[in-house]
């Protein structure tokens, strides 16, 4: 065993993958870091999936433009996978002509895999490893997205001591597997997580984690799902929130203000940025 | 190290050693003027050193006479007390925190730090890995660090940021230690700070145990290592353990090895731990992970927690420090005093 030379890493600082918008990249210190797990927490309809879809497209950009020149694996646990939206985003994506593929379709470099249960995900990890070892593509797999991790755990486990222990052991197993892959192959791993409502006076989820004392979304007090044990498993946690302007009651053009904030991250101070979702993608403003 | 027994500043001690004065006898044989030229201090200071040396050696003789029957390796509490006075400490860069810790993280001991995600465990770890390198002239240890990363949260860009801030603040440290350092400009470069952190990334608990076993040999080759940081000791031990008794045994064995390393090489061991909920008397409470038997394994235990919008550190267990808590904050420059107006040290 030999220590790693950190000097070597200065010239080659932790690689980041752009999320496709310079403003958001600045908020995230350059993008999603490689060799670690980044978690996106948000309630439904805030833009987690939009973020991830955009990320897997922009990962294909060359490093000179903030990408990783990489293909990605999109593991989805909620059906259906939004193919149409990916298609739509890919039209706005700057196509990259390469010597052998004059007009490569960006969707070709996104692998999609459905996973239904936590055990299936555990089983998928060695397969991903084999794939990574044998992949000789010019666009190596560098990004893994799991959308969403919470869906795997929200049904199969009872609220009993034994089941909760089994559950948290699985968290650590999955996170350990992902982290070791991330380290070995320089992957950027993104997992999305849902939120649960916090009930006043209720205990259990009220533990403060990170920069933001309380998380608010849609005017409700929320907390990331899966509890404290899972929070220990991720390296960085980002929170996406939305606030509906109550003016439009008819719902025809209800404007939501969305915001992304850093809850905790080893390399980032607390910061946040507003963003919008358009046909072309997710953009900071 | 006999020179270590002298109640003089670390820089003078360093100069004495550098000039070849390793034993008390060698010092007392020298004249004041000779000593003054050899270690570049004024004659008054040299006289003072001579005085201390003769006092200390007299003390030593009296102890030596009364304890001839001691078992090999045995020490009296009196010598240990004397030695403890010179136990070096590594500053946390947060004055309030240093105050409750009696000056910083103690060498020769195992200290456990735990708290919720995002409280700043990794930040404290990185800060210590940088601070251990503050040169002797500035009241530091001038040592190197071993950083064992189990979680992948160690970011080089962040280390660089903290290292640069530390170098900028270095003159301030010397001020704290009332040292006269105009003449000894020590140039440090952030790159050399990075070079002096031996970084290991481990991806499973077997690797972690293997590495801890290997450390003895590694430090034997790198004697100037003064701190070992494991961030976090917990992560790999919270998966795949059906046999909890095995886990407890492995953890205890590891803790014992680390404690031995701390003694043998006179270095500080800092273990970062996660928190978990525990069901106590009908309600869930937060405690550090790894269970009750682990809580006996570390000499000191410090719990990090949120108090309103402020980060606090609380000494939960220590044989020599009283329980107290202090506020700290995590800034761009690293760990610093909490900037809020209520800078009180609460007695608990």
Image: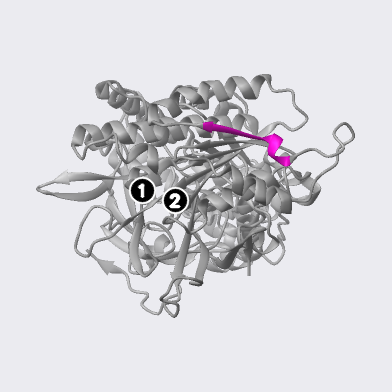
Q: Which residues are magenta?
A: A106-113
Residue B200 in sight: yes
Residue sitting farthest toward the right: A99
The numbered mark 2 sits on a residue in which chain? B
Classed neighbour count for the residue bearing mark 2: other residues with Cα under 10 Å, few (<14), some (14–19), many (≥20): many
The residue drawn where x is 14% and y is 46% is B280
Classed neighbour count for the residue bearing mark 1: other residues with Cα under 10 Å, few (<14), some (14–19), many (≥20): many
Question: Was residue A110 drawn as part of the magenta stretch in this picture?
Answer: yes
Quadrant position of the C terminus of chain A in the picture: bottom right
Q: Quadrant of residue A92?
A: bottom right
> Is B339 in front, or is A273?
A273
Query: What x and y, as percent, mark residue A219?
Result: 36, 70
Where disc 1 sits, the SS reads strand
The residue drawn where x is 59% and y is 37% is B199
The numbered mark 1 sits on a residue in which chain? B
Vertically, is B269 above or below B325?
Answer: above
Question: Was residue B281 drawn as part of the magenta stretch in this picture?
Answer: no
> Is B159 in front, or is B102?
B159
Vertically, is B138 above or below B194?
Answer: below
Left or right of residue A157, residue A179 in this image: right
Tell me, yes or no, whether the two marked residues, 1 and 2, touch with CB atoms within 8 Å: yes
Q: Which residue in the structure is indicated by mark 1?
A: B114
Residue B69 in sight: no
Query: What x and y, as percent, mark residue B61?
Result: 38, 39
Where disc 2 sits, the SS reads helix
Query: What x and y, as percent, mark residue B332?
Result: 57, 63
Q: What label does residue B148 carry, if any?
A: none
Q: Which residue in the structure is indicated by mark 2?
A: B121
Disc 1 to disc 2, how far (Cα)? 7 Å
Left or right of residue A53, residue A44 in this image: left
Quadrant position of the N terminus of chain A in the picture: top right
């Amino acid at each position: 065993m030999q220590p790693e030379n950190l000097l070597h890493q200065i010239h080659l600082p932790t690689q980041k993958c752009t999320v496709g918008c310079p403003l958001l990249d600045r908020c995230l210190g350059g993008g999603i870091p490689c060799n670690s797990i980044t978690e996106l927490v948000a309630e439904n309809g805030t833009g987690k999936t939009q973020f991830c879809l955009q990320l897997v497209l922009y990962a294909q950009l060359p490093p000179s433009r903030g990408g990783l020149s990489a293909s990605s694996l999109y593991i989805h646990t909620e059906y259906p996978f939004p193919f149409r939206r990916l298609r739509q985003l890919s039209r706005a994506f700057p196509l990259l002509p390469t010597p052998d593929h004059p007009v490569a379709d960006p969707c070709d470099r996104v692998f999609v895999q459905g996973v239904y249960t936590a055990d299936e995900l555990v089983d998928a990890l060695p397969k991903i490893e084999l794939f990574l070892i044998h992949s000789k593509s010019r666009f190596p797999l560098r990004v893994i997205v799991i959308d969403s991790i919470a869906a795997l755990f929200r049904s199969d486990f009872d609220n009993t001591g034994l089941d909760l222990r089994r559950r948290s052991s699985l968290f650590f197993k999955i996170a350990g597997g992902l982290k070791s892959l991330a380290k070995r192959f320089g992957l950027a791993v993104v997992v999305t997580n849902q939120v649960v409502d916090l009930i006043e006076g209720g205990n259990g989820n009220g533990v403060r984690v990170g920069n933001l004392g309380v998380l608010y979304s849609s005017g409700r007090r929320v907390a990331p799902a899966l509890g404290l044990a899972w929070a220990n498993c991720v390296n960085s946690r980002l929170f996406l929130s939305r606030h509906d302007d109550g003016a439009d009651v008819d719902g025809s053009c209800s404007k939501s203000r969305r915001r992304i904030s850093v809850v905790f991250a080893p390399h980032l101070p607390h910061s946040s940025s507003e963003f919008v979702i358009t046909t072309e993608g997710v953009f900071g403003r | 190290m006999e020179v270590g027994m002298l109640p003089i500043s670390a820089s003078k001690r360093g100069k004495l050693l550098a000039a070849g004065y390793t034993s008390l006898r060698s010092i007392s044989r020298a004249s004041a003027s000779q000593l003054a030229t050899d270690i570049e201090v004024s004659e008054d200071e040299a006289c003072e050193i001579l005085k201390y040396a003769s006092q200390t050696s007299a003390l030593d003789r009296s102890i030596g006479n009364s304890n001839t029957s001691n078992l090999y390796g045995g020490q009296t509490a009196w010598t240990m007390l004397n030695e403890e006075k010179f136990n070096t400490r590594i500053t946390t860069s947060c004055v309030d925190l240093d105050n409750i810790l009696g000056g910083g993280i103690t060498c020769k001991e195992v200290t456990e730090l735990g708290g919720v995600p995002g409280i700043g465990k990794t930040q404290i770890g990185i800060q210590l890995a940088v601070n251990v390198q503050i040169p002797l002239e500035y009241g530091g240890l001038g040592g190197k660090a071993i950083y064992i990363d189990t979680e992948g949260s160690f970011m080089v860009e962040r280390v660089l940021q903290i290292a640069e801030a530390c170098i900028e603040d270095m003159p301030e440290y010397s001020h704290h230690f009332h040292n006269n350092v105009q003449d000894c400009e020590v140039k440090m470069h952030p790159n050399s700070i990075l070079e002096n952190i031996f970084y290991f990334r481990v991806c499973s608990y077997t690797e972690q145990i293997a590495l801890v076993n290997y450390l003895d040999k590694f430090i034997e080759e790198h004697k100037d290592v003064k701190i070992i940081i494991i961030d976090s000791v917990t992560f790999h031990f919270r998966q795949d353990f059906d046999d909890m008794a095995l886990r407890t045994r492995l953890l205890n064995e590891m803790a014992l090895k680390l404690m031995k390393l701390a003694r043998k090489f006179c270095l500080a061991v800092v273990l970062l731990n996660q928190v978990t909920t525990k069901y106590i008397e009908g309600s869930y409470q937060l405690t550090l992970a790894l269970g009750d038997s682990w809580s006996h394994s570390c000499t000191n235990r410090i719990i990090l927690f949120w108090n309103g919008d402020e980060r606090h550190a609380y000494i939960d267990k220590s044989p020599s420090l009283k329980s107290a808590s202090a506020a700290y904050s995590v800034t761009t420059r690293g760990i610093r005093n909490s900037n809020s107006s209520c800078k009180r040290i609460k007695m608990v």
